[in-house]
Every structure is written in C-alpha cells, then in structure tokens.
Image (cartoon, rainbow, N blue to C red):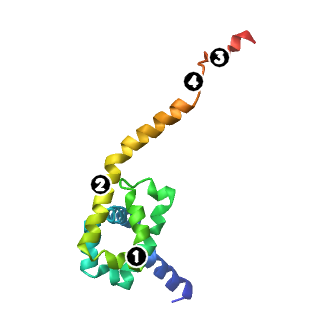
Amino acid sequence: MSNSIVFSSQLEAVMETEEQARNRFQSELEFIQCLANPNYLNFLAQRGFLRERPFINYLKYLLYWKEPDYAKFLKYPHCLHMLELLQYEHFRKELVNAQCAKFIDEQQLLHWQHYSRKRTRLQQALAEQQPPQQQQAPTHANPAAK
C-alpha cells in the first residue's frame, strides 16, 4: 500500500461526519450550560472530576464557547463566567465545599432578581438625560418627479 492511501484512510478515521459534529456540538452546549449550576460544580468537585488532568484539559478546550459565533447559542451565559473560574485550581478546590456552592448559588439568585430592575432604572436615567428627538416626516423620493 502506498503512503498516500494509508494517510487517506487515517484522515478519514479522524474526520467527523456532519452528524457526529452536530452531536458533539449539542453535547458540549448542554454540558457547558450545566456549568452555570453551582450545585453541579459541587457534585463534580466532590467526585474528584475537577482534580483529573483530562477533565481540566477538557474545560480549557471548552473556552472556545466564549467566541461570539458559539456564545450566541447559550441560554445561560453565566456558564462562561464559571468556565473561566474553573481554569483556576484554587476555585476548583473550593468547590468541594458545599458552603462555597451555596454562596455562589445565592449570589446568582440575587443578581438575577435585581438585574432587570437595575437595567430598567439605568435605561430610564439614560432616556431622561438625552434631549427628546424631533420627529421628522420621512422623505420619499418620487421617481416620477425627476
């Protein structure tokens, strides 16, 4: 067998089919969004996953989700912040403590409860600072007038 045939068959073994790529995308999307749940992070830490080098490497690999082309698919963007924090050994070690997970959970809840109210107040303040814009009638070009 020639080298090109061997290389070609090895390349085919490495290449993903479209269905495999779609399944990987969906699995990674689901997993990364689970990272927004501090109780799940506590579960992973207590079972030792956050100490295993392959799992830590996988978390590093998942950082590509921070790119806008991928982040737009996230329903829980807070997971990206957790993914960033999981890059730090100290954070991974602290997650073994249930009190740490509970604190993060409470902080998330407080953020979500007050986020919309703060945003509304900010938007109102900005609207009050800007002078009212005069409405002008739209001008439409009349091609027959030329």
* Residue found at x 65% / y 17%: 139
Q: Earlier in the sequence, mark 2 or mark 1?
A: 1
C-alpha distance separating marks 3 and 4: 21 Å
Q: Earlier in the sequence, mark 4 or mark 1?
A: 1
Discs 2/1, front: 2
Query: Mark 1, residues whose alpha carbon is within 10 Å: few (<14), some, or many (≥20)?
Result: few
Residue position for label 3:
139
Residue position for label 1:
58
The three-letter code of the residue at mark 1 reads Tyr
Residue position for label 4:
132
**In the image, is residue 112 above or below residue 22?**
above
C-alpha distance separating marks 2 and 4: 36 Å
The spot of residue 118 in percent (x, y) is: 40, 43
Label 2 element class: helix
Discs 3/4, front: 4
Q: Earlier in the sequence, mark 2 or mark 3?
A: 2
C-alpha distance separating marks 4 and 1: 52 Å
The three-letter code of the residue at mark 4 reads Pro
The residue lying toward the viewer, choosing from 120 and 63, is 120
C-alpha distance separating marks 2 and 1: 28 Å
The three-letter code of the residue at mark 3 reads Thr
Q: Which label sits on residue 49?
A: none
Q: Earlier in the sequence, mark 2 or mark 4?
A: 2
Q: Is residue 37 visible?
A: no
Taking the image as shown, residue 132 lies to the left or right of residue 85, namely right
Answer whether labels 2 and 4 touch (C-beta < 8 Å). no
* Residue found at x 37% / y 43%: 116
The spot of residue 40 in percent (x, y) is: 26, 68
